[in-house]
Image (cartoon, rainbow, N blue to C red):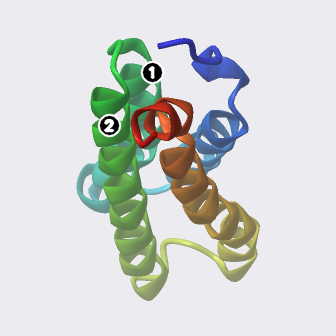
Amino acid sequence: MASLSFEKLSVYQLAERLADDVWHIVAGWDHIAKETVGKQLIRAADSIGANIAEGSGRGSYQDNRRFVRIARGSLYEVRHWLRRAYTRKLIAEDQACQLKPVLDELAPKLNAYLKSIGSAELATTDK
């Protein structure tokens, strides 16, 4: 399985950006917000990139695809926690506007990356 180093993948870099942006936002919250919504949000955001990295290191297309699906699930979890944070007025309008383009770009990039994994191998076995 020849693959690009995960650090060079634009989808991974975007996941890192989201995780760092989330971290900086949560860092300013009070204790109860950090301990409840904040920890869950940070874990979910960090999980996106971590699963892309782990999948790329597993050595099989099947495992890589499974971990990208987990990363996609973590992205949806991030969206949930961001909605909770916004509703509870933990995230300001400008912070939500900062995160929205990253979220909007990351979902299709994860789907495209998932589709691309093993596509060369699948094309040769379909003949």
Which secondary structure, mark 1?
Answer: helix
Looking at the image, which residue is at 67% across and 72% down? 100
Lateral position of residue 92 relative to residue 124, left or right: right
Measured as percent of width and height from the top left, residue 127 is found at: 46, 40
Measured as percent of width and height from the top left, residue 76 is found at: 38, 66
Question: Pointer 2: residues within 10 angstroms few (<14), some, or many (20+)?
Answer: many
Looking at the image, which residue is at 48% across and 47% down? 114
Question: Pointer 1: residues within 10 angstroms few (<14), some, or many (20+)?
Answer: many
Which secondary structure, mark 2?
Answer: helix
| Quarter of image, res 20 | top right
Looking at the image, which residue is at 34% across and 50% down? 69
Looking at the image, which residue is at 56% across and 32% down? 120
Q: What type is the residue that disc 1 sits on?
A: Ser
Work out how far the residue at label 2 is from the one at label 1, CA to CA, in angstroms: 8 Å
Residue underneath mark 2? 67
Task: Mark 2 or mark 1: name the one nearer the start of the chain.
Answer: 1
Measured as percent of width and height from the top left, residue 77 is found at: 33, 63
Lateral position of residue 57 relative to residue 73, left or right: right
Q: Residue furthest bottom?
A: 87
Are the residues flagged by discs 2 and 1 in contact, CB closer than 8 Å? yes
**How many numbered marks are there?**
2
In this view, the residue in front, 81 or 91, is: 81
Q: What type is the residue that disc 2 sits on?
A: Phe
Residue 56, which numbered label?
A: 1
Residue 108, which numbered label?
A: none
In this view, the residue in front, 83 or 64, is: 64
